[in-house]
Amino acid sequence: MINVYCYAKCTTCKKALKWLDDNKIGYKVIDIKEDHPDEKLLRKLYKNSGLPLRKFFNTSGILYRELELSKKLPDMSDDDMLKLLASDGMLVKRPLLIAGDTVFLGFKEDEWKILL
């Protein structure tokens, strides 16, 4: 089963869900604001993704800017970043798609076509 963490007002999330629908790929939508991933899941996703942990942050989000995280993240440990990400779903880059051990951050159609 594919799980997609989304925010209902996010246009990128809407595009991603439309793409999944158009390609007849089944999925479950999870509201990233109300039911965000916890620290344990984020730790697993980070490990499986092979990406730098900073890529998990929604750098265009209001909360990211309000907290001035662009200045703070370089000095934070992975544990601190994971705790912060787990504290509020609006800090997590979206859509966040999880298909088994495969993790996608954001919607990049070319990548999704190859792996889905």
Image (spheres, rainbow, N blue to C red):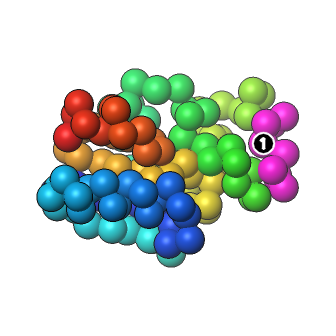
Residue nearest the viewer, comparing 85 with 107: 107
* Mark 1 surroundings within 10 Å by alpha-carbon count, few (fewer than 14), some (14 through 19), many (20 or more): some
Q: Report the side of 58 relative to 109 (left or right).
A: right
Above or below residue 99? Residue 34 is below
Q: Position of residue 107 (x, y in %)?
A: 43, 45
Residue 39 visible in rendering:
no
Q: Amino acid at mark 1?
A: Leu
Residue nearest the viewer, comparing 20 with 101: 20
The residue that label 1 is drawn on is: 69
Q: How many marks?
A: 1
Which SS class for mark 1? helix
Asked where in the image residue 111 lies, by quadrant, the reply is: top left
> Does the magenta stretch mainly form a helix, a strand or a loop?
helix
Q: Report the side of 9 relative to 75 (left or right).
A: left
Residue nearest the viewer, comparing 57 with 39: 57
Q: Report the side of 99 relative to 97 (left or right).
A: left
Q: Which residues are magenta?
A: 65-72
User: In the image, is residue 18 part of the stretch drawn in magenta?
Assistant: no
The quadrant of the rendering that contains the N terminus is bottom left
Asked where in the image residue 110 lies, by quadrant, the reply is: top left
Above or below residue 104? Residue 17 is below
Q: Residue furthest front?
A: 22
At x 56%, y 51%, the residue is 92
Q: Position of residue 53 (x, y in %)?
A: 55, 32
At x 79%, y 36%, the residue is 70
Above or below residue 100? Residue 74 is above
